[in-house]
Image (tube, rainbow, N blue to C red):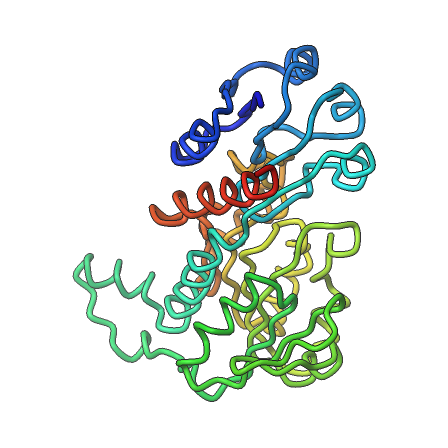
Amino acid sequence: MKILFLDETHPILYSIFEKKGWTIEIDTTSSKEQIESKLPRFDGLIVRSRMVLDEQFITHAKNLKFIGRPGAGLENIAVEFAEKKGIHVFRSPEGNRDSVAEHGIGMLLMLFNKLNSANWEVKNGQWNRKSNWGEEVMGKTVGLIGYGVMGKAMAQRFSGFGVNCIAYDKYLDEYSDEFCKQVSLEELKETADIVSLHTPLTEETKGYVNEAFINSMSKPFYLINTARGQSVVLDDLIKGLKSKKVLGACLDVLEYEKTSFESMFEENKTDSFDYLAKTHNVLLSPHVAGWTQQSNVKIAQFLGERITEHFH
């Protein structure tokens, strides 16, 4: 089989395919039109987020047997259309579940213990102890929205902190386990002190955390978003921060990221960003929760093994 890589990935994935006797070609620079013109020559396609594989694109894939997405999100691939064409779509969320969970917990601990400001104050010769008193995670109720691979990994990490962990997932039936209790969305909104998003980006989840969602929470709460930026309406989040209905936010992803995730702004949103950048109770990181030295390897390895097992 001939496999085309549209994004760079860890070389272990190249090795897994080459051991099967498959040939690979790496093209991370050609335009979408150029890729479409040569697509019929390939049996497999590996893509992360550089390019949207819409129905028109997939129509050019006359001989494609599979599309592989290193990582979790599939919003840039017309999955149903591809599967109707007999093209299998693979992903590897297990590869970065640990890094996402650790990053989310790390951001929360940093926010609760004011480590960002305390670090810079001490480095600048300021010794402000009382203003840097922290907040304990222990005893709080953590509400996870989405209890797939990422949600479960987060619940497992939280289990050592003495929290009450609850989860709501519209698409699962029985998912209570040793780390987390299944609840309705209403119960989650009634009891959660911390809300962590673990949902894919779909029409249903776009703008999920908006003014109505924030106002429907019974208590002031903290928000963690390591999922997709467009699931949180930032202008509404800022209203919640100003009213103190939202006590703080840990955001690895932003509503106006480029769809490739490689740069910040899809459009001009500087007023919103300026507020987030300046407020003390918001932590930001550049969509890297899923990326560690280890996850880079695991994402590629899980995907390669999944694909080659299918085409054994």
Tell me what residue is drawn at x 53 percent, y 16 percent. Answer: 29
Q: Nearer the viewer, residue 231 or 12?
A: 12
Tell me residue 42's x, y (percent): 63, 19
Q: Nearer the viewer, residue 26 or 200?
A: 26
Q: Is residue 283 left or right of residue 198?
A: left
Q: Quadrant of the C terminus?
A: top right
| Vertical order, 176 against 171 (above or below) | below
Q: Is residue 196 left or right of residue 33?
A: left
| Vertical order, 283 against 70 (above or below) | below
Tell me what residue is drawn at x 68 percent, y 37 percent. Answer: 76
| Vertical order, 104 against 40 (above or below) | below
Tell me what residue is drawn at x 51 percent, y 24 percent. Answer: 22
**Quadrant in the picture for residue 120:** bottom left
**Quadrant in the picture for residue 225:** bottom right
Residue closest to the far front? 312
Q: Nearer the viewer, residue 161 or 193?
A: 161
Residue closest to the far bottom? 139
